[in-house]
Image (cartoon, rainbow, N blue to C red):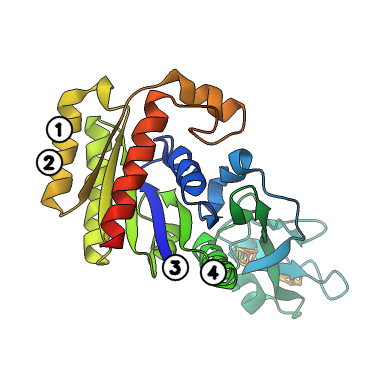
Amino acid sequence: MKQVLILSGKGGTGKTTVAGAFARLAAPCVTADCDVDAADLHLILSPEPAERNEFYGGKKAAIDPAKCSSCGRCAEVCRFDAVRREPYSVDRLSCEGCGVCAWNCPEGAISLTGSLSGTWAVSKFRFGVFAGARLEPAEENSGKLVAILKTEAVKAAEAAGAEWLILDGSPGIGCPVLASLGGVAAAVVVAEPTVSGRHDFLRLAGLLKEQKVRGFLLVNKWDLNPGETAELEKAAAGYGFGLLGRAPFDRGVVETLLARETLGERGRTPAAEAVESAWKKLRAALEN
Ligand code: SF4
Ligand code: SF4
């Protein structure tokens, strides 16, 4: 089973559109949405409903009103303004779980408890098996949730004997991206031909080089700036990336997404053909 991770320097470059199209082209496969902070791959893959598993990330403080003497010490020491006064309680959205209030409470009225940070589930969809997660608002530890999701997706792929595991990664170079890199055969970076797009790409290419992950580039909306497209491809070649081609600006992409389908599912459009060609190139490169 080969893991292919789709990445981008920032959101909105077409990363999830490409991941959805690859999931269709690789079918039957296992697909996971590792962009847990802004999960949206499920919108076009429409997985079957499944029982959701709870994910407990960091800890949060809680005040036992029976023990609290209303001395106010916890509110004084909390640097995140997470303690409400009269009666004393903790705003769990603001609490960072640092524990300073508990150390300072003279009555031992504060405890740190696990906080429900998100949920994850694995279920069938029309091209195989889908693993998806959702982080609760203002919750952190998305890297830990991505690691859990990846473990479950790998298990599902092994159980199904799937040839491909397609992973929709997070944008940028943060913790969730690092958590999704382990064990991947290749990372496909979807980039747009702008100066900032090239800057974002270079950061990501540096990370992939450092992590010794084989990289590939797919330029989206290349025809909006052919000069920058050439610069992107030159930079990618300098990092040893494989070039998967260029997808043009295509109004058919929006229509496909509005219909909650994957690119190419409603028929052949210029961008759908470019992404299918990219998939064929990638598959050929990974089979060698
Ligand atoms: S420090 Fe403890 S006793 Fe004092 S107000 Fe806070 S919870 Fe209550
Ligand atoms: S754990 Fe830290 S952030 Fe949370 S209420 Fe206590 S002092 Fe504030």
Q: Earlier along the polypeptide chain: callout 2 or callout 4? A: 4
- Give SS at disc 3: loop
Mark closer to the observer (4, 1) = 4
Observer-nearest of 159 and 221: 159
Q: Is residue 106 above or below residue 262?
A: below
Q: Which mark is residue 230?
A: 1
Q: Is residue 11 visible?
A: yes
- Give SS at disc 4: loop
> Where residue 93 sits: x, y (%)?
66, 54
Mark closer to the observer (2, 3) = 3
Is disc 3 surrounded by few (<14), some (14 to 19) or many (20+) residues within 10 Å?
A: some
Q: Is residue 154 left or right of residue 190?
A: right
Alpha-carbon span between mark 1 and mark 3? 33 Å
Name which quarter of the figure residue 207 lies in.
bottom left
| Kind of residue at badge 4 | Gly
Instruction: Find disc 4 in the rendering and name its residue.
Output: 161
